[in-house]
Amino acid sequence: MSGASFSAAELTDFTGGYWLKGVEPHDPLSISTDTRINNCGKIFFALVGERFDAHDFLNKAVESGCDAICINREKISSAPVDIPVLAVDDTLLAMQSCAAHHRRRFPELTVLGVTGSVGKTSVKEMLTAIASAAFNGKVLSTIGNTNNQIGVAQNLLNLTSEHRLAIIEAGTSSPGEIAPLAEMMQPSGAIVNSIAPCHLEKLIDLDGVALEKGAIFHEVNGHAACVFPECTAGRDILQKAAGTNRILTFGMDGTGDVSAVFKGGDLAGSSFELAFPDGGKYEIHWNLTGKHNTLNAAGAAALAYSAGISPELIASALPNTVLPGMRMKKTVIDGVTFFNDAYNANPASMHASVELLSSVGTPGRLILVLGGMKELGKDSAAAHRTLLAEISSRLPETKVITIGDEFAGLSTCHFSKAENAEQYLRSILAPGDTVFAKGSRGNAVEKVLPPEAR
C-alpha cells in the first residue's frame, strides 16, 4: 500500500506556499523528511527542530533523488537550483496541513485517537491487536512512539483506501500541543487513558494535564465515543471537553461502563475479567501483567466497543497484544533475570511497578535500578522521596540503585549517570537475582543493563 501523494497545485493550496520561479513538479509527489532514503517521486520537507535544521541538508536531499523540496521562506537564499522549490511560512505546519487534508480524503474511515499520561502506547497496541483481528490486518496504527507534532502527520500520510480503521497516538509535554494533533486526525472517537503528574513543569498541575489531554475530544465527530476513566483527576474537565459527544467510561471492580477485575498473576502473565455494558463478561488470560495493564485493557476495550467491535472479538483479540521495546522486556543471562521497563517513568507508573513487584514477588533477590523522573517541576523532590519510602515499606529487602540528578541526596546507592552504575551492578549480581530497571527516558537507565537486555 502506498501513502499520500499531492499534485503541485494541491501542495500550494494546502500549504499556502508558492513555487520559486514558477517551476512546478509535473507528477504527484509523496512527502519525505529523510535524506537517507531513496527520495525519487518525493518532495523533501526541510523541518526545523530544537536540535536540527534540515535546511542544512538540502544538497543531500537533492542527492537522494527527490523531485522537489519544501523550505521556509526565510531560507530561500539556500535553495538549490535546477529543482522545483516550494516556499512556505513553516515547513512543519505545511506538512501538518497536507496530512490533515489527506486524512479528509477518507471521510468514512474510523480514526481512533489515543492520549493519556500513563499507558497510552500500551492502549494503542491493545487497540491495534483488537482492530487487526476485526479488520483482517487492514489497520493503520502509530508506528512505535511517533506521537509528536512530526510523527502524527507522518502516520496520517500513510493512510490508504485499503485501511478500515486507524489508531493514532498523540503525546504532549506543553499546553497547546494536543489540539493541532487532534485537528489533523479528526478522530471518530478518542480515549484519554489517564491523568497523572507528568510534564508538570509546563502543565503545572493535574487540572492542567486534563485540560491539555482533553483537547483531543474537541475534534471528535463520529460514531465512536469520548472515553476516559470513571475515577480520575480532572473528570469534570474531561466531561466538559467531550461536549455533546457520547461518553463511555472504564474502571476496575465494577466502576465504569466497561469494567475489569484483576484475577492475579505473576511476572510472566495474568488474568482478568472484563464486563461490558451489554452485560457480557469475559475472562482473559494474557502474557501482560499487573493491575495497571488490566485497567489499560478496560480502556482499550471501551473505545473499541464504542466503535462497534463486538465484546467477543475484543476479548479474544486482547491476548494478541505485543508491547514495544523497553516495556517489561524479559531477558535471562547467566541465571539473572532482567526486566527492562526503562522506556519512561512518572510517579503513577513507578507506583504501578512497585505494586506489581510487591504483589507477585520474585524467587531470588530483587534489585531495582531506578532513574529519576523528569519534568515534575516543584513536586520533583517530594515525588522521589515518596517513591523511595513506598519501596522501603512494600519491598524492604530490595536492593535499590538510583540514577540521575533527581535522586541526588535521597539514596544511599546513587550514580549520576547510568553508565557509571553498569560496573557496580555487574559486580553484585548472582544467579537467581531479578533486576528491574525503570526511569525517565532522559536518564537512559537501560545502559546499566547488559547489552542483550537493553
Image: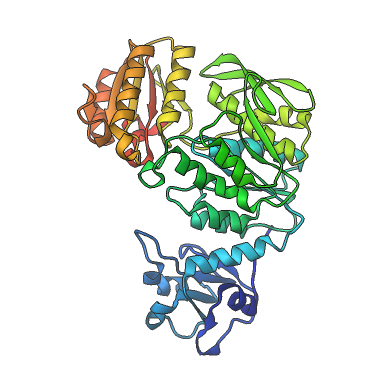
User: Is 60 left or right of 383, judged from the image as shown?
Assistant: right
In what quadrant of the picture does the C terminus appear?
Answer: top left
* Residue 440 percent coordinates (x, y): 37, 37
Farthest residue, direction bottom: 21
Q: Give 2 or 87, whichever is nearer the viewer.
A: 87
User: Is 436 left or right of 23, judged from the image as shown?
Assistant: left
* Residue 297 percent coordinates (x, y): 62, 29
Q: Is residue 103 above or below residue 200?
A: below
- Would residue 340 be visible to someone looking at this image? no
* Residue 254 percent coordinates (x, y): 66, 20
* Residue 68 percent coordinates (x, y): 53, 77
Q: Give 293 or 21, whichever is nearer the viewer.
A: 293
User: Is 365 left or right of 67, judged from the image as shown?
Assistant: left
Q: Give 72 or 144, whichever is nearer the viewer.
A: 72
Residue shown at 63% from the left, 53% from the top: 219
In what quadrant of the picture does the N terminus appear?
Answer: bottom right
Residue 129 found in image quarter: top right
User: Is 285 left or right of 62, judged from the image as shown?
Assistant: right
